[in-house]
Image (cartoon, rainbow, N blue to C red):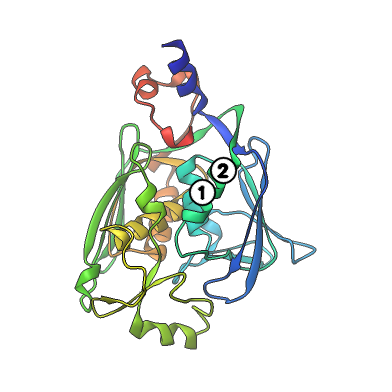
């Protein structure tokens, strides 16, 4: 029992990677080649993006209030107007794996899309191994129910005892195959199918996106494209709920912009980056809605440890 207890306590300490990791790819929307390098960072650093193609004013912090655009991807900016876009897939991987501190170096304005999922990020992060510090993690505990809506689209944040549950629904009138709903317990479930789920779009939207300067790097290699109910990719679905699982992935990455992992229940219907961002802003705009808790041995319930809550931090 002593060894089990020690393991469970270790997941409550801040974590970074052991070794630097490099990714090369193309930006989904910019179409530009990009080299991204992840570096270990000391405790209490948080997640920081650095634009190495710029000599000054090149640090950008992934904070919900630094989101400058949430149309088709999540873009963050600093006070000098320097941006980094499509951060959501990497942020989801970092949240799910319990990585608290990291420096992310980019030589362009957009993260590499890889295969359209978080699969490559997760595999490389796990292969790197992790450094666990002696500093406790902090979590955001939701205290009150908060709902943000745009017509039929909505997201609700509400209290939950010891975990993070995301319940997501998508509906598309013109494409019935996309009508899906699924639920993930982020700190308890096997998240492999979520990490492996690719971004998707409708065939009729591809040219529209390209005309407004988006999806310049999009292809069947990094996105599922649907024409009616037909999947145009040679690789069909990786899992039964791939479409909604990707939406859960996006949601997880977007809510990690809160700065800490969240304990609560999130329910969303027909939402996306914009709805999630504005809902999270509303949640965090009132201090009565949430608490920031530093997880130390003395203030953690015994049941919290035995159930191996936040096991994704291990």
Please determine whether, in this image, residue 289 is positioned above or below residue 230.
Answer: above
**SS at badge 1:** helix
Is 34 on the left or on the right of 267, as rendered? right
**Residue 33 visible in this rendered orientation of the protein:** yes
Identify the residue at image location x=42%, y=21%.
Answer: 300
**Residue drawn at (48%, 58%), measured in percent from left and top?**
88
Disc 2 on helix, strand or loop?
helix
- Residue 127's tag is 2
Closest to the observer: 104 or 258? 104
Q: Which mark is residue 166?
A: none
Residue that label 1 marks: 123
Tell me if mark 1 has few (under 14), some (14-19) or many (20+) residues whose alpha carbon lies within 10 angstroms of its own: few
Q: Residue 207, image x and y in percent?
A: 42, 87
> From what the image shows, is residue 236 above or below residue 146?
below
Say left or right for 272 vs 124.
left
Residue 86 located left or right of residue 103: left
| Residue 28 location (% of width, % of height) | 52, 72
Percent coordinates x, y for residue 136 in the rendering: 55, 28
Q: Are marks 1 and 2 in contact (CB under 8 Å)?
A: yes
Of 171 and 314, which appears nearest the observer? 314
Residue sticking out furthest to the right: 55
Disc 2 crowd rating (10 Å Cα; few below 14, some 14-19, many 20+) is: few
In the picture, residue 149 is in which quadrant?
bottom left
Q: Residue furthest front?
A: 234
Residue 282 visible in the displayed image: no
> Residue 54: x percent and y percent?
76, 66
Above-or-below relation of 118 to 31:
above
Q: In terms of depth relative to the viewer, which is nearer, 10 or 55?
A: 10
């Amino acid at each position: 029992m002593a060894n089990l207890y020690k393991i469970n306590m270790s997941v409550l300490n801040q974590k970074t990677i052991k070794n630097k990791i490099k990714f090369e790819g193309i930006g989904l929307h910019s179409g530009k080649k990009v080299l991204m390098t992840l570096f270990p960072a000391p405790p209490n650093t948080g997640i920081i993006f650095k634009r190495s193609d710029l000599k000054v004013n090149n640090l950008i912090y992934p904070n919900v209030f630094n989101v400058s655009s949430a149309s088709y991807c999540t873009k963050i900016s600093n006070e000098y107007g320097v941006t980094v876009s499509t951060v959501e897939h990497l942020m989801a991987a970092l949240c799910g794996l319990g990585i608290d501190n990291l420096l992310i170096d980019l030589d362009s304005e957009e993260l590499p899309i890889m295969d359209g999922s978080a699969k490559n990020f997760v595999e490389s992060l796990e292969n790197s191994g992790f450094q666990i510090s002696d500093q406790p993690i902090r979590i955001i505990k939701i205290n009150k129910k908060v709902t943000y809506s745009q017509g039929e689209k909505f997201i609700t944040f509400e209290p939950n005892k010891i975990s993070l549950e995301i319940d997501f629904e998508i509906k598309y009138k013109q494409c019935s195959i996309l009508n899906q709903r699924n639920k993930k317990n982020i700190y308890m479930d096997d998240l492999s199918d979520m990490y492996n789920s690719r971004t998707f779009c409708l065939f009729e939207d591809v040219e529209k996106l390209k005309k407004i300067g988006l999806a310049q790097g999009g292809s069947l290699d990094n996105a599922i494209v649907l024409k009616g109910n037909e999947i145009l990719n040679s690789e069909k679905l990786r899992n039964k709920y791939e479409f909604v699982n990707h939406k859960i992935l996006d949601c997880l990455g977007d809510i990690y912009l809160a700065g800490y992992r969240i304990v609560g229940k999130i329910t969303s219907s027909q939402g996306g980056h914009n709805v999630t961002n504005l809902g999270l802003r509303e949640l965090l705009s009132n201090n009565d809605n949430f608490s920031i808790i530093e997880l130390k041995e003395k203030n953690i319930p015994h049941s919290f440890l035995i159930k191996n809550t936040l096991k994704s931090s291990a």
